[in-house]
Amino acid sequence: MEWFEIMKAREEQTMSELWDCYDRDFNKVEGKVLIRGQESTFSDDEYHLVCDIVVSHADGLFLLMQRDYRKEGAPGCWELTAGGSALQGENPLECAKRELLEETGLSADTLLEVGKITVSKHHCHYVIYLATVTCEKDAVTLQEGETIAYQWVEKSEIFKRKDELATCRVLEVLPTLEEKKYEIKHLPKERWKGTPIMMVTRSDSYFDVEMSPLDEKGCTIHLVQKKAEKEIVHTPDEYDFPDSLYQDHWEGAEAYGIVGDNGELLACIEVCPESWSNRLIITELWVNDALQKQGWGRRLMDKAKEIAKEQKRRAIILETQSCNTNAIGFYLHQGFELIGFDKCCYTNKDIERREVRFNLGYFFHVNGRWG
């Protein structure tokens, strides 16, 4: 299709685009619908919702996309965000997910709201999200007639090139993306019980478990890390009982974590005493992708070790899976060691599924640790 035909089709589509109406204080006006292209008729108290999505790779680089030179507005300029107007009936998060996929071809591992900006002259409330992705960097797709190139750059380079950007609006919140001052707080049971933990694990390797039958002479067990043929991904919707805080069977559990400005849980650790064995169980440990590689996993683990010391526990134990090699590496670095495994914990084919339960332990009274 020729470029002008594409643009004509898109223009016809946008002329019929409907938006929900919001007042200047970001309250939705029920029953009021705005029509794209009629902004000049909006009253001073009528706004529509726009989502801007800053895309950051897990390695810390940010995505810039170059606008087509044939576009009417800011031709050839670079954009720090994907985004667009929320359609009638869409909430901000739904809009952000759709626009990100449409404009970049990417799906975020995590979408975290990081700011809001109101521009009265545009009748717009902008909701800004940070999308964290772990995909291959060449997975970005370009939109015919919209974008012609993309680059992954350091955050410092974005400010150096601000004169090349189509808009500098998002630069107001960009410095805070990695500099927010978070702290680990106690998460009271009455407030956080039942809160789902959106645990998504990704790995390109796994520990293969080979075990010979046990006889009077014993048996042989081999655990060998192997490269997976394709990425191994596990999400909460695979399980009948997805993770959540303060589940009933963990009597005496206590949770600690990081809560964002909008009340969203960003990271957590939950521990529960196993009194009969004098051990502390880590029942949950999770860090939002937006806070990965900033030391929060280590600080949460330090919190568990602090609690164990206060309670005079002899060990800390936890459960992970043979396919979660990233987590296993983290735990080993934190001083944990393998104390056992269960080859039929989740199904009767856990070995074939490459999801064998590994039990890891951290022991006090050894190697100069607390005693």
Image (tube, rainbow, N blue to C red):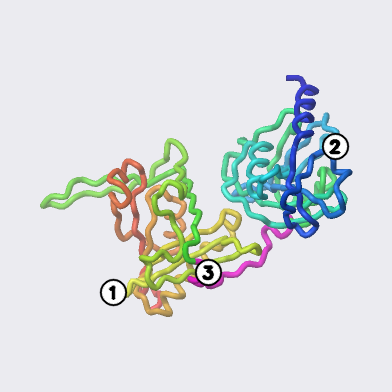
Identified by mark 3, the residue type is: Arg
The disc, 2 or 3, on the residue closer to the chain's N-terminal end is 2
Residue that mark 1 sits on: 276
Vertical order, 50 against 259 (above or below): above
Crowding near the residue tagged with mark 1, few <14, some 14–19, many ≥20 C-alpha atoms within 10 Å: few
Which numbered circle lies on residue 73? 2
Q: Nearer the viewer, mark 1 or mark 3?
A: 3
Crowding near the residue tagged with mark 2, few <14, some 14–19, many ≥20 C-alpha atoms within 10 Å: few
Which numbered circle lies on residue 191? 3
Identified by mark 1, the residue type is: Trp
Quarter-of-image position of residue 16: top right
Q: Secondary structure at mark 1?
A: helix
**CA gap, disc 1 and disc 3:** 29 Å
The disc, 1 or 3, on the residue closer to the chain's N-terminal end is 3
Asked whether 312 or 219 is in front, the reply is 312
Residue in view at x 70 percent, y 49 percent: 154
Question: Residue 57 in the image: x percent, y percent?
Answer: 62, 47
Q: Nearer the viewer, mark 2 or mark 3?
A: 3
Asked whether 91 or 302 is in front, the reply is 91
Q: Is residue 74 left or right of residue 347?
A: right
Magenta stretch contains residue 61: no
Identified by mark 2, the residue type is: Gly
Magenta stretch contains residue 177: yes
Question: Residue 155 in the image: x percent, y percent?
Answer: 72, 51
The disc, 1 or 2, on the residue closer to the chain's N-terminal end is 2
* Contact flag, marks 2 and 3 (Cβ < 8 Å): no
Position of the N terminus, as image quadrant, is top right
